């Protein structure tokens, strides 16, 4: 799936093949699984940011909305094993951002899913 759906959309600004609606669905599917749980694996963090980048303000608003939605979720069982790596990647991505709203959204997501202790 990654090579067919994620990589091309996150590596391209093409809106013909990778429409706004496609990027929205892709981002949502990366972050929240079909059961409503947080499911972002560490290796997809950079793809999440890259897939939304061509959407500019709309992508930023979508990421902020996803951060709010994550705050209402639990972590999927499948992601619990690598959640610390995901938090680390979210922190790195937030630190690399020049846009404070994107950095804040990534930091909020990381803060919600950080394991206690």
Image (cartoon, helix red, strand yellow):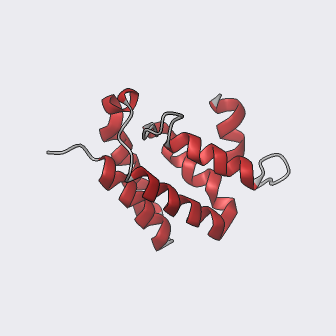
User: Looking at the picture, does residue 9 appear above or below residue 54?
Assistant: above
Q: Residue, x 42% and y 41% (percent of image)? A: 38
The answer to whether residue 100 shows anywhere in this view is yes
- Quarter holding the N terminus is top right
- Quarter holding the C terminus is top left
Q: Residue, x 18% and y 45% (percent of image)? A: 116
Comparing 117 with 68, the one in front is 68
Q: Position of residue 20 (x, y in %)?
A: 74, 55
Q: Position of residue 78 (x, y in %)?
A: 39, 27
User: Looking at the picture, does residue 62 appear above or below residue 48?
Assistant: below
Comparing 5 with 71, the one in front is 71
**Residue 33 appears left or right of 55:** left
Q: Residue, x 49% and y 33% (percent of image)? A: 35
Quarter of the rendering containing residue 96:
bottom left
Q: Where is residue 113 in the image (x, y as percent from the top left)?
A: 32, 46
**Residue 117 appears left or right of 73:** left
Q: Residue, x 51% and y 60% (percent of image)? A: 65
Looking at this view, name the residue that lies furthest to the left.
117
What is the number of callouts on the image?
0
Q: Position of residue 102 (x, y in %)?
A: 49, 65
**Residue 94 appears left or right of 115:** right
User: Looking at the picture, does residue 15 appear above or below residue 43?
Assistant: below
**Residue 4 appears left or right of 109:** right
Comparing 100 with 24, the one in front is 24
The answer to whether residue 11 shows anywhere in this view is no
Looking at this view, name the residue that lies furthest to the right.
16
């Amino acid at each position: 799936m990654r090579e067919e759906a994620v990589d091309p959309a996150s590596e391209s600004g093409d809106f013909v093949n990778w429409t706004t609606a496609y990027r929205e669905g892709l981002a949502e599917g990366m972050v929240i699984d079909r059961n409503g749980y947080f499911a972002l694996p560490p290796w997809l963090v950079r793809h999440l940011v890259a897939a939304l980048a061509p959407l500019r303000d709309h992508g930023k608003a979508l990421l902020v909305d996803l951060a709010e939605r994550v705050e209402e979720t639990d972590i999927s069982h499948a992601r619990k094993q690598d959640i610390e790596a995901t938090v680390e990647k979210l922190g790195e991505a937030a630190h690399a951002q020049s846009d404070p709203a994107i950095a804040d959204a990534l930091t909020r997501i990381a803060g919600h899913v950080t394991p206690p202790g």
